Image (spheres, grey):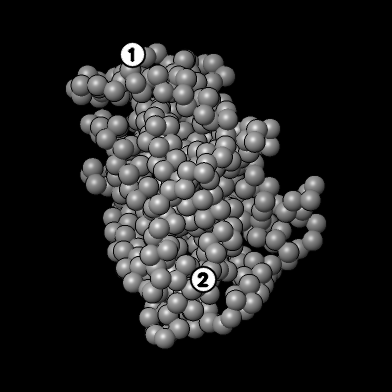
Amino acid sequence: MNDRANFGSKLGVILATAGSAVGLGNVWRFPYMAGQNGGAVFIIIYVVCVLLLGIPCMISEFIVGRHGQANTARAFRLLSRGTPWALIGYMGVLTGFLITGYYAVVSGWCLQYVWASLIGHLQGDPEYFRTYFTELSSDPVKPVCWTVIILGITYLIIEHGVRNGIEKASKVLMPTLFVLLLLIVCASCMLPGAEKGIEFLFKPDFSKITSDVFLSALGQSFYSLSIAMGCLCTYASYFSKNTNLTHAATQIAIIDCLVAILAGLMIFPAAFSVGVEPDSGPSLIFITLPNVFAQAFSDLPVVGYCISLLFFVLLSLAALTSLMSLHEVSTAFFQEEFLMTRKTAAVIVTVTTAVIGAFCSLSLGAVQGLSFFGKALFDWFDFITGQIFLPVVGFLTCIFIGWFVSHKIVRDEFTNRGTLPGRFFHFYIFLVKYVCPLAILFIFLHQLGFLN
Ligand code: PHE
């Protein structure tokens, strides 16, 4: 397997993997979670969780992937020496596969909003935006088409391979995303009354800390770093033997936190400036925000138009780079396990995830009968992947690396076969053995409602 694809440069490694991490989780989920959980305190806890728990989990997945130089299932199989631990890899691939279709639906909404902003349909009063979103998400045709379109774009990138597809695309998309982000942050922070939003984000009110805030921040940090979906493991299999895994994980985590905080700085100053409460939940981006932009820039409609358009372009780019990494998990799996060409593997993944995506989308109102036990199929995918598989795979990966895999192998990968000092190795092992599994166990119990 010496001719296996790899990333061509260090920058490519960082941008592609950061592209996986930076996604709807940062721009869509993080702001509403911060809004609902007290702003600054949530952010502080979130950053601590990323540094102390997220980074070691990322390094663990990197170790498995780079050691195996193969798709997630095979990488785990190689290290598990014929034991059932190999199942973690298969679960990782399955999680990545299942979440692709569902993530594509939300990414499709973003594209639809780009289109709507472009043709000037995102103008009106708060009620208009609410109806617009409800009608869109329950429409039988439009969201399915957008899901297929975004998966088609992902396919075109993935089909070009690791270096010419993923790496090249990330090198263009990520800097563009960053510039757009800074532009909108500037516009939002210059609005009258923006200070209140900045204060909400940065002035902690410690009375707001509850176990709920704590565990939500923990869960968000894992989701946001793409932990336990096979993505990090798959991408790490394309890293070179000289990539410093600790540095890479730290840099990616910092970029991810930075983008999340900047997303907050894009949204809250504008929301406070027009007196909209930031705690509206998942609809924050699709209902509250277009309204906030429309009101905040009502004197300068052209600026409002551009900001709204740029915002949804940004959101779509963030979604696309994450979708690429999710798609790659299954593509690499099919390609290597069933000895197919990359193209055939990518076609299979695109078609099957498009079907899953279509069913998820239709379950939101267009077709009756796609709800089970009172939950739409879409919500089931969200629940099973995010709240069951993610913690289970994350937990098992930590236990696997911390307790099962020989520390010699782990140390070899951690220090690039002894060429790096590996000063933090013992601290890393301590976190992976005890702290991370316990933390994940708490998130899991909390999400299932056993812990409040
Ligand atoms: N980390 C991505 C985000 O923040 C979500 C994601 C999870 C992407 C898992 C890929 C894999 O949106």
Q: Which of the labelled discs sits on residue 275, or is there none?
A: 2
What is the quadrant of the N terminus in the image? top left
Q: Would residue 25 appear left or right of 372 to someone viewing this image? A: left
Q: Nearer the viewer, mark 1 or mark 2?
A: 2
* Label located before the other in sequence (1 or 2): 2
Q: Report crowding for label 1: few under 14, some 14 to 19, many 20 or more residues within 10 A (C-alpha).
A: few
Q: Is the C-beta separation of discs 1 and 2 under 8 Å?
A: no
Instruction: Measuring from the top left, give residue 128's x and y in whole percent.
Output: 62, 79
Q: Report which residue position mark 1 lands on.
A: 408
Picture layout, residue 132 above or below residue 332: below
Residue type, label 2: Gly
Instruction: Measuring from the top left, give residue 315's x and y in whole percent.
Output: 44, 62
Q: Residue at x 37, y 57 (%)?
A: 262
What is the quadrant of the C terminus in the image? top right
Query: Is 346 in front, or is 305?
Result: 305
Q: Would residue 423 appear left or right of 368 to someone viewing this image? A: left
Picture layout, residue 241 above or below residue 193: above
**The quarter of the displayed image where residue 156 is located:** bottom left
